[in-house]
Amino acid sequence: MVTVSLEVQILFAGLLFLIGLVGLLVRRNIIFMLMSIEIMLNSAGLVFVIAGSHWAQADGQVMFIFILTVAAAEVSVGLALILQMYHHFKTLDADALNTLRDKNER
Amino acid sequence: MNTIFYIAGAIALLSSILAITNRNAIHALLYLILSLLSISVIFYILGAPFIAALEVIVYAGAIMVLFIFVVMMLNIGLEEELENKWLKPRMWILPSIIAAILLANLIYALRVLEHQTVTPQIIQPKQIGISLFTTYLLAVELSAILLLAGIIGAYHIGKQKKKIIHRFLKK
Amino acid sequence: MTAYIPFIPAIPLLSSLIIILFGRILSKKIVAFLGVGSVSLSAIITIIAGINFISSTPENGSYTVTVWNWLTTGGFSANIAFSVDALSLIFCFVITFVGALIHLYSVEFMDHDEGFARFFAYMNLFVSSMLILVLADNLLLMYLGWEGVGLCSYLLIGFWYKEPENGYAARKAFIVTRVGDTAMIIGLFLLFINLGTLNINELMQQASLKWAVSSPLAILSAALLLGGALGKSAQLPLQTWLPDAMAGPSPVSALIHAATMVTAGVYLIARTHVLFALAPAVQAAVAVIGAATLIIAGFSALTQHDFKRVLAYSTISQIGYMFLALGVGAWSAAVFHFMIHAFFKALLFLGAGAVIHLLHHEHDMFKMGGLWKKLPIIFITFLIGSASLAALPLISAGFYSKDAILWFAWSSTNGSKWLWLAAYFGAFITSIYTFRMIFVTFFGEAKTEPTHKPGKLMTIPLVVLAIISLIGGFIELPENFGHFQIFSRFLSTTLPSVQLAGESHNELLFQILSAIASLLGIYLAYLLYFKKSSFAESFSNSQLANFFYKGWQFDWLYDKVFVKPLVWLSEINKNDFVDKIYTAIAKATEFLNSLLSRTQQGRLRWYVMVLTAGVVIILTFMLNL
């Protein structure tokens, strides 16, 4: 089986997380932002599985299943919101939806 | 086996990077699916065949199909000029710095592990099932409720309503 | 037997509430019936109570009817309770009896006024408040009545509110009396803190037990109560509001600013006489203030042109006599003069009101004249009232009451020849200005024609009051003739009798002297204003007369001393410097807000970025420390 050291595995998961984070911070298209969040969630699940296999426990994988559930719910609601957003505003630009800004400023 | 880990890991990282940098939504999603598939390979070799299967079925299958459907419904994909305008090089600076600091932190934190090697054991789906329905029963029920709420919420939000603008928003 | 006492103030209050609530839909007849009837009913109950009181006087001279517990907090409790004794009965009688007559008069007087219902609502409310004031068994309830009459006074002075001057006069009365009221409430606090109660009987007992004569606390609290009395009774130095208060309708002047409310100060001092006896210095001040006021107001009355202003200054002057009597310890003489004054001054005001009413609201005396033929009833009754005011010997009630004060000002232990001299001189001036009024208005050539004859509703109260002004004095005759003193014997259960100084004087001499003063004053007025002496003409144009006419320039003085500095101060402090603190707080908050609102620029990615940066910073510190 695998004999890669634990830190490399976790580093790998961390890199994946950081890629997701950078994507989230950089992209303005809201679909890409949602995709980046998926990457981040997935990498978090990966850490759980790595830890579970390290301790030879089922708990890590159970946690992954929960993450999967949360991701599924989040994606369904998020995508519904994106649909409505596009329907109303005819754009996917996250910066265009800035009604919550403080109007006194600027 | 280590070679497979490294290859799969490299593919996952690369396809993730491509996914977040791509201008075309469909292409990006395909890269994301590739990334998820390679992660599922890693799951498999880490001794989690059940999770690897779930990753493929639920993540790469169901969730990504959802994404693709939405992209299809919105009928986008030919907006590369807009994306080019949005993705200016200087946008990358600040996120990269933050990510770099975080990475440094991570490496600094990982030094305590001192090259521990993993001897993975295959954990059978049965074990997971037992664990789910004994120790984590409450959490399972909660996630059932969460999913139900997600379904109802998504249905309610995603419904194509008649164009009734709230009276405060009327110009 | 005593359960009907609360109805004395309650009936006018109820009637007032009915008129306030339904005044718009009730017809004039019903309003008049309610207004007059309620006060008359109170008068009848008061008379019944008086008869019961005389036939079975309680042992300690008073009894209390508690209606309910008003408020209880900590060690303090105040009841809605009415205390009946000789003093409060006399006041009640005057208020309800004179009040009923004035209400009756007002029915005709206010007949064509659009505020008919409003007028009766205020008047009934006033009567009710005044009755609460005199019947209250504790000082807090008394203060309620005290403020109630102040409010009604304000409302009624400004009754014709469409004229800005009337509103000004109303505010002036309210604010000037407020100065006194503030002193009084501080006095109440002081009494409660030191004696632990506000119940008048207990208070008086406690005060005489705990405080020595001339102890600082006694002097201070007596002085503060005196402050309240000075404001309400328009005595020096708070007298300036009363002449302006004549802006109200004449019945109001008669009831509130002559007969009842302005004598509330007299009542307060008589009621708390124990306290004043403990503070001889303050009591002496009461006498001096009374003497000074009666002379100052007398001189002012001498130069007025406005019919009602003459009477207003004469009211101030007569209350000065009452204060003088209180100051020398002649409590019953003060109350006696109050009663007689209420009758004849109400009569005079009603007579003056009738004249003004019939002459198209002409206030200037010098534009009247020769009215004695045209308005004989008003002339005769007014003459009787004037005789009483001028203390015409033997036949007028005013003679007996004023003579008693003059006598005690000399002969009581607290009296002195200076006080007597002032009062004597005041009596002389009083008869001059009174008969100046008579000669100018009712004699000489006619200048304005009356529109019509006064109706029955106006003349009946005048006649009744005139009869009382004639015979009212006989219930208290001096010792040297008649020695018929039913009034002071009646009061002796409540008020101590006057302490005469050791040396005896011939009382008859003083009576003859005051009779001379009165007659001499009338003769002088006859010379000056009937014979039209050139001196009267030249005097009325002099600087001195103008000084008197302006009420000794007190208004000018107060304007310079109080109003101008206040206006000046508020002008330089237009942007209140205390406000600066608060505006600075607001400014600082606004500045912080503008700083923080920079983070709220509505860009989702920026929020995520900041959030992540925060997490990174915290994480970095946690890992490295």
Image (cartoon, rainbow, N blue to C red):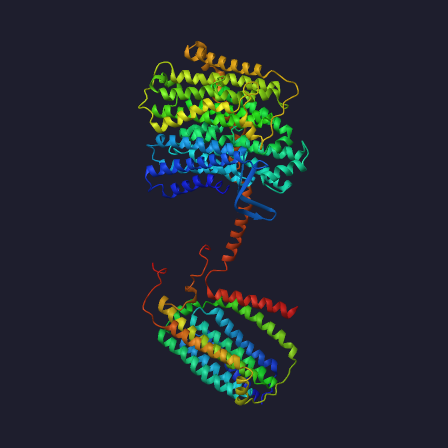
Q: At 50% across and 32% down in the image, what residue appears?
A: C91
Q: From the viewer's side, name the closer residue of B28 and C403.
A: C403
Question: In the displayed structure, would residue A16 be above or below residue C97?
Answer: below
Query: Residue C223: x and y, percent?
Result: 60, 32
Query: Residue C573: x and y, percent?
Result: 53, 37
Query: Residue C259: x and y, percent?
Result: 47, 29
Q: From the viewer's side, name the closer residue of A89 and C127.
A: C127
Q: At 52% across and 57% down in the image, what residue appears?
A: C596
Q: Is there any visible trace of residue A1 in the rendered image?
A: yes
- Quadrant for the C terminus of chain C in the image: bottom right
Q: Is residue C187 left or right of residue C175?
A: right
Q: Is there any visible trace of residue C350 in the rendered image?
A: no
Q: Is residue C418 left or right of residue C608?
A: right
Q: From the viewer's side, name the closer residue of C376 and C527.
A: C376
Q: How many marks?
A: 0
Question: In the displayed structure, would residue B105 be above or below residue C214?
Answer: below
Q: From the viewer's side, name the closer residue of C33 and A6.
A: C33
Query: Residue C528: x and y, percent?
Result: 44, 12
Question: In the displayed structure, would residue C258 be above or below residue C24?
Answer: above
